[in-house]
Amino acid sequence: MYEHLKIEEKGMVAILTISAPKSLNALNSKILNELDDYLSQFDCNRLRCLIVTGDGEKSFVAGADISEMASLNMLEGNAFGARGAKVFRKLETLHVPVIAAVNGFALGGGCELAMACDIRICSENAKFGQPEVGLGIIPGFSGTVRLARLVGMGMAKQLIFTGKPIKADEALRIGLVNAVVPQSELMDKALEMANQIAANAPLAVKAAKLCINDEWDMDADAAILNENVIFGRCFLTEDQKQGMKAFLEKGKYEFQGK
Ligand code: CO8
């Protein structure tokens, strides 16, 4: 159905593999459009977690496609940047958690794609970086926005101004990734986490994701109030009632998302 996306479902977890092997999975307009289409039709009621990875053992995504960007003028540059930024925002605000399983190069737009995911796990051979200034551009898929939020302003400026990539252990040290594992275990670890998420009450997980995303930009009082409103709404759900009842009766309840 897609030329550059491979989709697999394992129970309530979807695995999305970006596949453009000739360019180390670099993102061109076609891939961005396919990604947009996939996210638009993603069934957040049936599926409870999404894993995003890259095809092969060398690269997650080696950036935006330089051959497509080389001849752009200013307006076309704006349009290409906006295209990627919009799709990445769609991923970030998807109503289920998204785990990036970073299996190699995550450079430029690849690092930005990983940062638009909720959680990042990487293999030992992964390399992260924002090499854009070495090409005469800046991170244009929201990298200047998300990197500083994730790792702090000083480290973000270092990575973006030098363009120098970092290895997996350094990415872990600065908090850019949650965990580093051997490549042969990467998908198993990502699936293990995804299945843990999928076993929890989906409406509560969704509410928690919305809270964390939305409250990031609020002042403390507004954020606390927002959490309180969403917390109260959890008590409208069947999952809360049955989940707590099962706990008190020492049983187990399979959450229905109701
Ligand atoms: N775009 C297009 N083609 C690429 C890209 C890319 N980002 N990355 C790799 N390729 C291609 C190579 O050109 C090569 O093609 P060919 O075989 O036809 O020569 C093939 O993939 C394999 O790559 P290499 O031979 O270079 O493999 P190496 O193992 O020697 O090196 C690297 C791997 C280090 C990943 C190297 O390929 C590299 O440096 N790639 C570019 C990385 C980069 O600079 N990425 C950032 C791009 S800019 C960006 O992402 C901006 C995002 C915001 C856009 C905003 C728009 C306005």
Image (cartoon, rainbow, N blue to C red):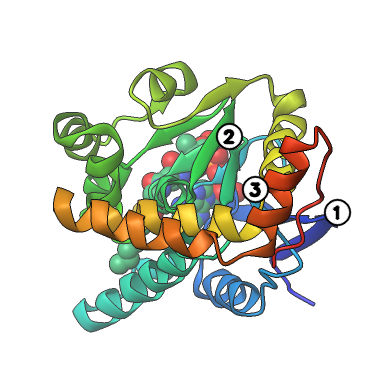
**Picture coordinates of residue 258, whole percent (x, y):** 69, 68
Whether residue 83 sits left or right of residue 27 in the image: it is left
The picture quadrant where one finds residue 93 is bottom left
Q: Residue at x 32, y 75 (%)?
A: 82
> Circle 2 — which element?
loop
Whether residue 256 sits left or right of residue 80 in the image: it is right
User: Which amino acid, by three-letter code, is at mark 3?
Assistant: Gly
Instruction: State the mark number for residue 104.
Output: 2
User: Which amino acid, by three-letter code, is at mark 2?
Assistant: Gly
Circle 3 residue? 54
Give the quadrant of the N terminus. bottom right
Tell me if residue 134 can be seen: yes
**Picture coordinates of residue 184, whole percent (x, y):** 77, 25
Observer-nearest of 59 and 41: 41
> Circle 1 — which element?
loop
* Mark 3 vs 2, N-terminal side: 3
Q: Residue at x 22, y 36 (%)?
A: 156
**Picture coordinates of residue 107, whole percent (x, y):** 43, 43
Image height check: is 46 above or below 228?
A: below
